[in-house]
Amino acid sequence: SGPARALAERRGYLDNITAIGPRTVGSPENEVLAVNYLLEQIQAIERESTDAHKISVDIQRPTGSFSIDFLGGFTSYYANITNVIVKLEPRNGAEHAVLSNCHFDSVPNTPGASDDAVSCAVMLEILNTLSKSSEPLQHAVIFLFNGAEENILQASHGFITQHEWAKSIRAFINLEAAGVGGKELVFQTGPENPWLVQAYVVAAKHPFASVVAQEIFQSGIIPADTDFRIYRDFGNVPGIDLAFIENGYIYHTEYDTSDRILTDSIQRAGDNILGVLKYLATSDKLAKSFEYRHGNVVFFDVLGLFVLAYPARVGTIMNCITAAIAFLYLSKKVLQPKTRGNNYTKFFTAFGVTLISWVCTLVTVLIVAVFISVIGRSLSWYTHFYVSVFLYGTAAAANLVLVHTLAKKFFLKNMNEQYLGDIFFDASLMIWSIALAVVTQMGLCSAFICTLWVAFPLLVKLMIHKDFYDFFFVMMYMLGMFVPYLYMLYLSWTVFEMFTPIMGRSGSEILPDVVLAGFIVVITMILSSYFINFIYLVKSTKTTLITLTAVFVVTLILVCSGIFFPYSSDAANPKPKRVFLQHTSRRFHDVDGNVVKSDSGIWINGFDYNGISHITPHVPEINDTIRTACEEHAPFCGLPWILPVHFMFRKNWYLPAPEIFPRSPLHFKVLSKELMPWNSVRLSFEVSGPSHMSLYVRPHEGSVLSTWSLGDGIPVASLGGDYFVFYSHGLQATPWHFWVELTAPEKHSDGIVSLAIAAHYFFGEDQKSPQLYALLERFPNWTFSSGWSCTYDLFVF
């Protein structure tokens, strides 16, 4: 049958691409084997296509440079990297096109099945399906198989800024991964262009999309970026960004293999993307996309069943009406004269008590989280997620109940329970209405959540106009709360699913327990908002409090005892600890070119807050006595960072090791030093070396790096004020020539600039030294350790 055959083909493509092994930019696996495999498949598809279509194939090998403000800001330079591009168009050509983008390269030491071979497999299969259909498309579909995304988005930049087909593109779909398998989530769209979201909603068979995810992602708190950003910023093209988000624990590890991607996950993605591409390629709006470019959309899926989408203006109007009705209801309630004393003060007392309960809860739970971190039991919930709920969830709930119980007992005593219940209901409604007004004012689309939390409770309240609380009331109440509660639980689950794994790769500086505890407190506060009033309606909360406290105390003792080990090597569901090891040889030169210091060692970075504390028992020589010292005079502490993430990993370790002598060493030449007008000096360099090199520049006190031959000519400083350049090349490349220009007021005896260059050996015979191999062998099986060799040279001019 058709669908079954299509699926087998997708699976075949996926297995064959991952069978090549890790596909690092510059390696024969990426530049030759993967490219040849793609070309063979494309040619086979071309031979079987119908007359309705014309297929053109192009291999692009661009060279270029750009600056990006990702990870604190840096500049990228690429030479001779690879793009495989296929254009499927009607027989007589097409003026407009839609782009579909995947990348076939992977990070070193991983098979990269989900990131992103599966997307390329899906795209090959869609090309196959579309080319066999007898009905012609209205517009062209361009399939870009890009060969350098893990090099921080280089190939997409090469395509969109240099390729002749790029000008015809009106919209794109980007297929990415932040996890392995599961459902692919639409996590950003636009900018603006509401018609694109509408297209997805209409055409995708199994939609899964969230404007909340979009606003979280675009706030920049997730340390990741995709090609979406390049098409948006350098191509001015709107698009849809999809990513697999399940099981982020094994994203970018050796476990990202094709057997872990379930067939129905591939099926879903294929159906969705085929539907959307087909819809866009036959849509009249694509040709006139600029007419439809304005306006944002509020979109969210309901339990993964269907997606609701409506213009943001409509959303704003609905939000304002909801808030207005709520404020009207509240002012009427608060200001109506009643015999029971002053409503007004009671209402604000309730409001105050609720806020105090929140602050108390947050402070208490965060103190627990900090305590757990300090005693070295961080991430005890990384493998056993329920631990976090039992530890922080119970603490948060117990705190909220306790504060309100005390308030009821000492502060609001001798008052009618039902009246109190009512007042606290109104206080919650008030808080949500204020939140709704503020979030709407900020222009966030996620305000629809606040609308749910105002509209449904308000409806319930207006429908049940009874003063006595009986079974009927409680049933109606629960029914009314069902929608906002269900949606909130669903959303929280998605957020946890995305964020918990990120805590395992968020660096040594962030306390993951504090972040997670904060999340749990906020969710507890939200979920408790309309149940607080029940504390005032029940006779006693003693049992509840004792139960919650008991669970909390037991969990706390167990966590402190270390019974919950953070990581897991379970074959079915691994949750490894990530460690990077770089066998490094460093040489520091002075102004006259003499080597003033040199050393060699294996430089170790643990990806999470626990550092290496769990590894020391297995590899005793890796302990806190070998913490890396910062070379204060050198840029980025004199360490061979592959990315400028020094601010996320301030704690690292340096184990002395023999010097390494790569077979293809780096060659660094000063071509010229020229005096320019305005006290400027231009230094020109030539570098040749392996496929990945990092350049680090630090102007000395009094000097300024005014311009250079990279990016758009304006140097972009990284966090901390040093400059970082990420260089990479494909299979071959001519030596890299670049110049920097500095303004220095007067002669300095100790030079005007320190410039360091690191060469990274990510594949081939130079990748792992015997010492590195031996060390990696001794690492426990619950780690994912990625190792490579590098050299580092610092010069002063």
Image (cartoon, grey):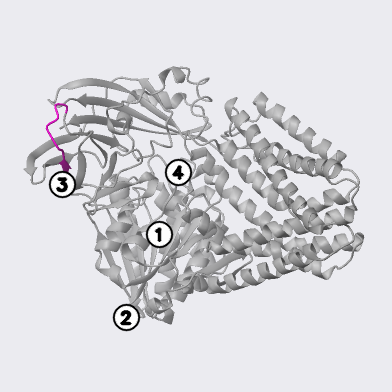
Q: Amino acid at mark 1?
A: Phe
Q: Position of residue 778 (x, y in %)?
A: 46, 23
Quarter of the picture containing the N terminus is bottom right
Distance between mark 3 and mark 1 Cα atoms: 30 Å
**Residue at label 2?**
91
Q: Position of residue 741 (x, y in %)?
A: 16, 44
Q: Amino acid at mark 2?
A: Arg
Distance between mark 1 and mark 2 Cα atoms: 30 Å
**Residue at label 4?**
252
Along the line of sight, the residue nearer the viewer: 72 or 7 = 72
Vertically, is 370 above or below 598?
Answer: below
Distance between mark 3 and mark 2 Cα atoms: 40 Å
Q: Amino acid at mark 4?
A: His
Distance between mark 4 and mark 2 Cα atoms: 41 Å
Give the residue displayed 64% in from the left and 51% down from the top: 493
Residue 745 part of the magenta segment: yes
First in residue order: circle 3 vs circle 4:
4
Instruction: Tell me whether the residue at label 3 lies in contact with that at label 2, contact meaning CB atoms closer than 8 angstroms.
Output: no
The quadrant where residue 511 appears = top right
Q: Nearer the viewer, mark 3 or mark 1?
A: 1
